[in-house]
Image: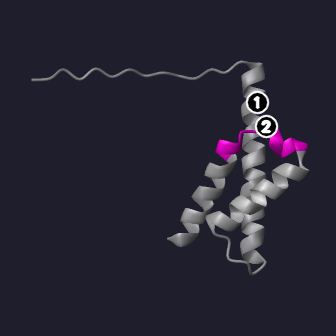
Amino acid sequence: MEEVVRYSYRLRPGRAAQAALLAEWHRCRFLWNEAVHQQKSGNKPTFGTLSKLLTAARTGSAWLREGSQVAQQQTLRTYAQALAQ
């Protein structure tokens, strides 16, 4: 019989880490809302078209460039998958 060992961890970020996480979540929420706006405008936002919009937005916005491109792409990928269902 195998013994199963489980551990429980709790993340307690410091002030700087908490501020960085909140800033990143604000950027991702902004992109999600922009994708919703694209859909409500009558466009059919696929991940490919949203990625092109993200590239253009990051080029023009230092605020978006400060954040993680991976997190931003994943936000748009999740939105596109939600539309496909």
Residue for point 18% across, 20% down? 3
Q: 15 or 20, which is in the foreground?
A: 20
- The residue under label 1 is which amino acid type? Ala
Direction bottom: furthest residue: 42
Please state the horizontal and vertical placement of residue 28, each as a whole percent of the image: 72, 48
For label 2, the crowd category at 10 Å Cα-Cα, with few meaning under 14, some 14 to 19 and many 20 or more, is some
For label 1, the crowd category at 10 Å Cα-Cα, with few meaning under 14, some 14 to 19 and many 20 or more, is some
| Residue 28 covered by magenta stretch | no
The answer to whether the residue labelled 2 contacts the one labelled 1, judged by CB atoms less than 8 Å apart, is: yes
Q: In the displayed structure, does residue 20 sit left or right of residue 44?
A: right
Q: How many marks?
A: 2
Residue for point 89% across, 42% down? 62
Please state the horizontal and vertical placement of residue 53, each as a whole percent of the image: 77, 61
Residue on which the image places disc 2:
23
Q: Main secondary structure of the magenta part?
A: helix
| Residue 63 covered by magenta stretch | yes
Q: Give the residues drawn in magenta, as a range.
A: 62-71
